[in-house]
Every structure is written in structure tokens, then in C-alpha cells.
Image: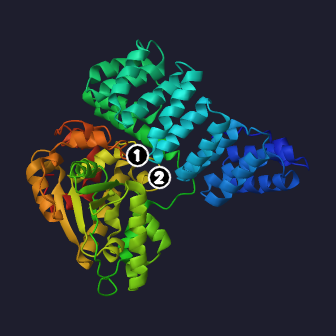
């Protein structure tokens, strides 16, 4: 979003008068000073006095977004666009999309940017914004032709070429990525070209060469992947304190993209749900169809690797971190304490309707619904599908927590809980406390699988899992790279790892940062002991 202008001199701010344009300027000054309530009051007055001017509505939309007010923000931004001369200014669409992304409404952001592209098909900022929104929606492939169209108008545009390369990387279109890097050739002193090639070399585990290119990028390259790469290079050189500082910088930048009034932490919500958890209200409502299976666990515990392995089975369809469950919560509030068979059956029909919209017809195949944070929603899932198979993926608590802290997650309310090591540890603790409570209160049908065993004894672990799921053995589940190549965009931070051969490189990475982990060990040690891991 375009940033508000500088704070105006005090004399102007104290004498608003009757001029709406002066009020717009004062509203911008109040935004710059962080006085959102005052800014909203000023801008509401300005829009009443001059309702046909798009500027005030656009600023008002920005304010409401910063306060997390979705409907008010969307309404104000849409008024700004509708009042703008045709074609609407590109900046108005960018501001609308930025506000919606701030509020995690990536669906609305994507639609707005599609409209913008119709008017401004080659605008680099709009095209890049659209690429980000499409990626958040799991539809990154839609951005490829848009990026290519913009590059036809702006050949060798550094930012657009970087976006195209990263899209190829995320979609594992490695032949296209290879060709793009070759086409760029010598990156020279262009930071984006050096970053593009450095990330490419990282993909091929050529970190020393990647480091030489990153040195040319300078400190101005603040993109989260650049910071991650700098951290990896620092750790490779044994500079662990420096690596930690890079991860802190990355997380501060990610937190800046979250609505400022979002003060209720995800882990507090989980803790409240744990305290309020009750036994089921009565006997389960029988389900006659094929039960879905749920893959859960802490983020960065190996759930994406597992769903990729399972995705190789011809009788399995994987839904990766989709929102069927959250939509059921919205449409059927309080379902976990319902005994109404008609309401539960309606929710089941809706769940499968949503799933098939995403993954296509199931045709009798097993639906594997993978979402790590579903582990904190067991009362709902158990009421919806009693005795459904639940697969808990375990990983050493320290490894999972450090990996969460050091991963550039999408900036949403849940993922902000991992922005510090302490926050990451406390969120892990809250999740597993909730899970433990659910295991005590509910008759869950659980199979536990260990990440550390899965990567070294893959066949043994998968045979036991397929038996649990009632599936016939097939060697296809062992070829995770083939399965990964077929699945297109991966919607998690593990997208690069699942295309690599199985390895144990990350297994003990957290121990290199043991000194930084020491303050959170009192939080994690009970779970380390309970799971039987070495400290």
C-alpha cells in the first residue's frame, strides 16, 4: 500500500477549517502519527463534505484495514475505485489489495487485482501484487501468463524476472527455472538477478556459490527469502548469533504485514479452547460413508512430507491445508456440542462439497485432510466424523520450534505466534496441551508417526500407516519426489524440501543454536520427556 505522507505542521493540523482537501491532508498526518481513531473521524467528515472524491475513501479504507475492520475497509476502497475516472488509477487497486492482504482476505485481494490487470495489464506493481495474492490462494500458476505478459512490455525488468523465477521455483517448474537463469546470464550488479541465481543455487545445494552472489545484493535486499538465505549462509560459516539476528529481522518484517489491532494471539485462543473443552454431549451420530483421514502435528514437524508420500497412493486424495474445517465452523457454530443428527449430516455434506470443489470428485478414494493446526480442533472433527483416522506427526519439540521460528510463514494470526523463539515454544506447548486434553476426553482413533523414523525407515513406517488406514501396500508411496512433481504448487513452507531426496540434514540443526534455545527449554522439556526424546 502507498504510505501516508509526512506529518503536517502543527498549525495546519490545529486549523482544519471547512476545506475537505485540507481534512484529507490532516487525516494523512494523523495516520502517520498512528492516531487511527482521530484519522477515521477526520476522514469521515471529509468524505461527508466531498463524497465524490476518491482520495478520502481510499485513506479511510486504509484506516479500517489497520484496525482489522474488513467490511468497512472493503466498502471504502470500492467507493474510491468506483468514483475514480476511468480507467481507475492503478494505486487504488493496489491499496485495496494491500488492505485485504493485511486482513488475510487474499480471495478479495486476488479478485481486485484481476480487475486491475484488465485496465493495467503491464503495470509491474500490480502484476507483482497479483502474483503474491495468487500464491496465497494456491493458484500461483495463474500468475505465470500475467508475469510473461508484463515482461513482454518490460523486458529484463529485475523485479518481474525475480517474481517469475520464484514462481517457477514454488511450482517446481525446474526446466523453466533453468532456462530463465540461463537467459539472464551474468547477473552483474543487479540485486534481483543475483538473488534469483543465488536462490537457484541454494536449490541445488551450492551454498558457497550462492553466498558469493548474495554478497553482491547488499543490505537493500530485504525480501524474506533473501534474509533466510543470509541466515543459512551465516550458520554454515558457524556464525550462529548472526543467523539468529537474521531470523529476527525476517520475523519483524513479517509481523509488519499483520493488522495492528490483532492483539489476540493464536496460542491464547488455543489455551482458551483447552480450558473450555468438554466431553462429547452424547453418543456419536453414525457415518455410513468413507471417513476422511486427518494429518495433524506441530507446523514444521513433517506433515507435508507425509502427505506427499501418501499422495503417491492411487486410492488417496490429499487436501493440503485447505479451509473445509474452518468453513464448517463458520456455517455450523457450536457443532462440537451438537446432538442434532440433521445438523451434523448437513455439516458432513457441506464438508465433502467443499473438499470436492478443491480436489475434484473423490470417486470412493480416501480423502486425507492435512492441516497441522487441526490438532487443536479435535472436538469438532470427532463430532463431525467419529472414529475418523487421525495421524499425529511427531518431531523433536526443539527441532519443530526452531524450524517454526526460522521459517518465513505467511503473515496471519496463527503464524505470528511463531515470530520469536519464546512465542514458538509457548505455541507448541499450547497446542500439545490442547491435544492431550482431547485425547483424555474423546475416543480418538490415532496413529502416531515420528519424523525422525519416517526419513530413515520409510517403508516400515508407511506399511504400519497404510495398515492403520486400511490401504493396500504399493511401492508408489516410497517415491515422494515423483508424487511431489505431480502436485503442482505446495502451499506450505516445505515446498522445496519435498522435492529433494530424503535426508537427515535438518534432524539436529537446532542443536547448533542450543545456546539460543536454552531459555525456552523449561517450556519444552516436559514434552521432550513425555515423547521420549533425548534432551
Mark 1 Cα-neighbour bin, 10 Å: few <14, some 14–19, many ≥20: some
Quarter-of-image position of residue 10: top right
User: Which of 213/240 is in front?
Assistant: 213
In this rendering, is residue 172 above or below 491?
Answer: above
Give the percent coordinates (x, y) of residue 383. Answer: 33, 77
For label 2, the crowd category at 10 Å Cα-Cα, with few meaning under 14, some 14 to 19 and many 20 or more, is some
Secondary structure state at the residue bearing disc 1: loop
Residue pictured at 26% horizontal, 77% vertical: 442
Location of mark 2 (residue):
412
**Splitting the image into 4 quarters, where does residue 198 fall?**
top left
Reading the image, the residue beneath label 1 is: 409
Of all residues, the one furthest to the front in this rendering is: 363
Q: Which residue lies furthest to the bottom in this view?
A: 282
Q: Position of residue 188 (x, y in %)?
A: 44, 12
x, y percent for residue 230? 36, 29
Between 146 and 167, the one nearer to me in the picture: 146
Which label sits on residue 303?
none
Where is residue 458 drawn, in percent x and y? 12, 48
Numbered disc total: 2
Q: Which of 11 and 215 is in front in this view?
A: 215
Quadrant of the snapshot with the N terminus: top right
Give the side of residue 412 with respect to residue 402, left or right.
Answer: right
Q: Residue at x 38, y 56 (%)?
A: 360
- Front one among 432 and 373: 373
Q: Separation of disc 2 and disc 1 at Cα?
A: 8 Å
Dot 2 lies on which element?
loop
- Looking at the image, do the residues carrying marks 2 and 1 touch, with CB atoms under 8 Å apart? yes
Amino acid at each position: 500500500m502507498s504510505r501516508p505522507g509526512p506529518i503536517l505542521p502543527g498549525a495546519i493540523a490545529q486549523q482544519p477549517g471547512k476545506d475537505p482537501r485540507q481534512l484529507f491532508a490532516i487525516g494523512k498526518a494523523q495516520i502517520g502519527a498512528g492516531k487511527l481513531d482521530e484519522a477515521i473521524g477526520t476522514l469521515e467528515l471529509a468524505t461527508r463534505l466531498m463524497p465524490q472524491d476518491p482520495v478520502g475513501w481510499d485513506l479511510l479504507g486504509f484506516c479500517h484495514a489497520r484496525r482489522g475492520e474488513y467490511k468497512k475497509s472493503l466498502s471504502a476502497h470500492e467507493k474510491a475505485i468506483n468514483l475514480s475516472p476511468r480507467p481507475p488509477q492503478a494505486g487504488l487497486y493496489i491499496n485495496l489489495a494491500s488492505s485485504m492482504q493485511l486482513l488475510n482476505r487474499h480471495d478479495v485481494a486476488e479478485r481486485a487485482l484481476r480487475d486491475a490487470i484488465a485496465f493495467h495489464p503491464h503495470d509491474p506493481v500490480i502484476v507483482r501484487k497479483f502474483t503474491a495474492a495468487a500464491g496465497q490462494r494456491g493458484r500461483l500458476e495463474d500468475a505465470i501468463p500475467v508475469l510473461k505478459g508484463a515482461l513482454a512490455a518490460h523486458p529484463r525488468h529485475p523485479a518481474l524476472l525475480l517474481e517469475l523465477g520464484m514462481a517457477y521455483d514454488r511450482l517446481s517448474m525446474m526446466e523453466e527455472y533453468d532456462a530463465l537463469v540461463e537467459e539472464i546470464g551474468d547477473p552483474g550488479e543487479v540485486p534481483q538477478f543475483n538473488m534469483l541465481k543465488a536462490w537457484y543455487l541454494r536449490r541445488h545445494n551450492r551454498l558457497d556459490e550462492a553466498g558469493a552472489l548474495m554478497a553482491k545484493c547488499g543490505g537493500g535486499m530485504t525480501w524474506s527469502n533473501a534474509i533466510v538465505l543470509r541466515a543459512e549462509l551465516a550458520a554454515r560459516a558457524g556464525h550462529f548469533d548472526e543467523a539468529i539476528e537474521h531470523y529476527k529481522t525476517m520475523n519483524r518484517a513479517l509481523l509488519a504485514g499483520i493488522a495492528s489491532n490483532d492483539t489476540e494471539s493464536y496460542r491464547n485462543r488455543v489455551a482458551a479452547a483447552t480450558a473450555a473443552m468438554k466431553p462429547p454431549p452424547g453418543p456419536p451420530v453414525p457415518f455410513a460413508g468413507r471417513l476422511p483421514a486427518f494429518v495433524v502435528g506441530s507446523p514444521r514437524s513433517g506433515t507435508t512430507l507425509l502427505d506427499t508420500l501418501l499422495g503417491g497412493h492411487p486410492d488417496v486424495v490429499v487436501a493440503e491445508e485447505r479451509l473445509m474445517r474452518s468453513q464448517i465452523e463458520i456455517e455450523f457454530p457450536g457443532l462440537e456440542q451438537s446432538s442434532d443428527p440433521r445438523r451434523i449430516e448437513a455439516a458432513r455434506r457441506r464438508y465433502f462439497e467443499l473438499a470436492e470443489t478443491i480436489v475434484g470428485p473423490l470417486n470412493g478414494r480416501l480423502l486425507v485432510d492435512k492441516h497441522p493446526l487441526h490438532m487443536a480442533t479435535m472436538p469438532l472433527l470427532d463430532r463431525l466424523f467419529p472414529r475418523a483416522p487421525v495421524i499425529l506427526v511427531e518431531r523433536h519439540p526443539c527441532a519443530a520450534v526452531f524450524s517454526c521460528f526460522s521459517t518465513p510463514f505467511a503473515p496471519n494470526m496463527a503464524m505470528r505466534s511463531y515470530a520469536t523463539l519464546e512465542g514458538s515454544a509457548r505455541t507448541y506447548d499450547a497446542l500439545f496441551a490442547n491435544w492431550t486434553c482431547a485425547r483424555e476426553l474423546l475416543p480418538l482413533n490415532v496413529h502416531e508417526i515420528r519424523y525422525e523414523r519416517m526419513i530413515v525407515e520409510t517403508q516400515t513406517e508407511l506399511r504400519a500407516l497404510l495398515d492403520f488406514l486400511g490401504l493396500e501396500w504399493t511401492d508408489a508411496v516410497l517415491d515422494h519426489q515423483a508424487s511431489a512433481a505431480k502436485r503442482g504448487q505446495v502451499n506450505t513452507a516445505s515446498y522445496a524440501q519435498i522435492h529433494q531426496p530424503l535426508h537427515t540434514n535438518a534432524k539436529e540443526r537446532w542443536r547448533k543454536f542450543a545456546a539460543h534455545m536454552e531459555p525456552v527449554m523449561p517450556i519444552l522439556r516436559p514434552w521432550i520427556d513425555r515423547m521420549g526424546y533425548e534432551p
